[in-house]
Image: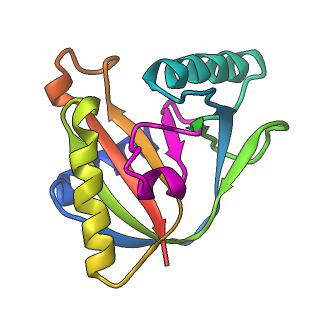
Amino acid sequence: LDHKVKTLEAFSTDEKNVVFLTSSKTEYLAIEKVESPQSLIEVDIAMKNLLNRAEKYSYPHYYQIGAMIPAENLLNKRYINAQYAFIPLEANLVKGRIHKKPKGLYARLYHGGPYSSIGESYERLIEEIYRKGYEISGYSYEYCIFDSLTSTESEDYITEILIAVK
């Protein structure tokens, strides 16, 4: 709950703004590869497989889901082609497919509305990254804040987008 409260507080403060922030700790993510063609159906299948594994092995995780999009896809405007589905872990106590989200500088923007329009938010975020003199240096991490499990209308969906920059 603490994790969710902090996320919602950040959203209420920075809802419409691009923010550059420094992550001072490594975050551990349990991941599942998204099969080709990396469409939303394949992301959903990967997420279900990951959640089943998390339940089977009692992963210490936050009840949050997300997707990782590689820089190459971002640069080619393939904003919904995720390479991995993920769940953030409370601790690095899991063996297996783990990704260490590195410490460092990230650009953040919250996308509100249906996932089908997330490309508009990516365009705005990437434009601001370049305008500030940065470049994309790693994955985009999408964290589902409100989705179909918490909202009945897709207009109410909220996705936190973080892109590693240098």
Picture residue at 25% right of the left edge, 71% below the top: 128
Q: Mark yes or no: residue 91 visible.
A: yes
In the depicted structure, whether residue 62 falls above or below residue 166: above
In the depicted structure, whether residue 35 falls above or below residue 89: above
The x, y position of residue 48, in whole percent, is 58, 16
Instruction: Say if the magenta span includes residue 12.
Output: no
User: Which quadrant of the figure has residue 34?
Assistant: top right
The x, y position of residue 105, in whole percent, is 48, 73
> Is 81 positioned to the left or the right of 61 in the image?
left
> Is 8 positioned to the left or the right of 98 in the image?
left
Q: Magenta span covers which residues?
A: 62-83
Q: Quadrant of the N terminus?
A: top left
In the depicted structure, whether residue 64 falls above or below residue 42: below
Picture residue at 63% right of the left edge, 43% below the top: 90
Instruction: Say if the magenta span includes residue 76.
Output: yes
User: Which quadrant of the figure has residue 57?
Assistant: top right
Q: Mark yes or no: residue 10 visible.
A: no
The x, y position of residue 78, in whole percent, is 41, 44
Mark count:
0
The x, y position of residue 102, in whole percent, is 63, 64
User: Which quadrant of the figure has residue 149?
Assistant: top left
Which sits in the foreground, 91 or 31?
31
**What kind of colouring is applied to the model shown?**
rainbow
Q: Residue furthest front?
A: 76
In the depicted structure, whether residue 65 falls above or below residue 134: above
